[in-house]
Structure formats: structure tokens, C-alpha cells
Image (cartoon, rainbow, N blue to C red):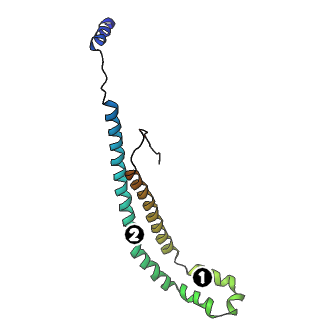
Amino acid sequence: MEQKLINAFRAIKYESNQDLPLNVWQAIVLRERRVARLKLWAFSLVGFVSLVGFVPVFKMLLSDFTQSGFYEYLSLAFSSGGTIVTYWKDFLLLLGESLPVLSIILSLTLVFVFFLSLKYAMRQIIKLIRPSGGGQLTLSLR
């Protein structure tokens, strides 16, 4: 049995395909470009949704600021001179309590998501524009 296998492999005389490394490299580069394009669209969509979502959240933040009375308390700091200096600890606690914390957190989260998706979208644009150069495979683990 072994002798038959040895003879069969000797008869075949394997010849390598000269274009195989180039074809493999082109397939890798093509796949990297497709993945980069898909990531670009995904990050762009997330950034656009967070930017569009920021408009109603900003309106909610402004209405929460006016409903909480934060502006009135803040204007009190500038209108009365000596009264705030004597009760500054209580005044700071009053300002802190009147802040609409949930609206602030929501708006800052949307801003953070927008800038983060913008950062990653720019990385994908750079990856798409930059040619894969020098015969080196540049893969990042990010």
C-alpha cells in the first residue's frame, strides 16, 4: 500500500502555480478593503444617528434646565453680592441639586458616541485611501 502511494506521488510531479502568491495577496487586500468599507459605512451610520439624535436630546436638555430653575439660581449668584458669599456651601449644593443630571449624561453620551464613531470612520477612510505598500501585509488588531 505504501509503495503504491509513493509511486503515485512520484508520477504526479507537483508543479507550483506561479501566480498563486499574487492571487492570495490580491484576495487578502480585496478582503481588507471590503471590511474597511463595511466598517466605514457602519461607523458613519452610527455617527449620523447620534448626530440626529442629539437634536431632540439638546431640546430636552434646554427644557430641563429651564424647568429645574437652574438659570434662576445661577442669576442669583450674579445679582446679590454679599449674600452668596456667606452661604456659599448651601448655594453650591442648591445649584448641584437643580442640575438635570439625566439630560446632561444623555447629551454627553451622544456627543461621545459621535466623536468616537467619527474617529473610527476617519481610520477606515485612511485605510481605504492608503495603498497597501511595499509587499508588506499590514494588519492591525484594533
**Crowding at label 1, few (<14), some or many (≥20) Cα neighbours within 10 Å?**
some
Please state the horizontal and vertical placement of residue 88, each as a whole percent of the image: 69, 84
Residue 95 image label: 1
Residue 127 lies, with reference to residue 76, above or below; the image says above
Residue drawn at x 46%, y 61% is 116
Please state the horizontal and vertical placement of residue 122, each as a whole percent of the image: 42, 58
Q: Residue furthest right?
A: 86
Please state the horizontal and vertical placement of residue 46, each as a whole percent of the image: 38, 62
The amino acid beneath tag 2 is Leu
Residue 133 lies, with reference to residue 60, above or below; the image says above
Secondary structure beneath dot 1 equals: helix
Total numbered labels: 2
Q: If the image is split into quadrants, where does the N terminus sit?
A: top left
**Crowding at label 2, few (<14), some or many (≥20) Cα neighbours within 10 Å?**
some
The amino acid beneath tag 1 is Leu
Please state the horizontal and vertical placement of residue 74, each as a whole percent of the image: 58, 86
Residue 51 image label: 2
Residue 33 lies, with reference to residue 106, above or below; the image says above
Q: Residue furthest front?
A: 134
Q: Nearer the viewer, residue 107 or 12?
A: 12
Secondary structure beneath dot 2 equals: helix
Q: Which numbered disc flags the more N-terminal residue, 1 or 2?
A: 2
Q: Name which quarter of the figure residue 52 lies in.
A: bottom left
Residue 47 lies, with reference to residue 100, above or below; the image says above
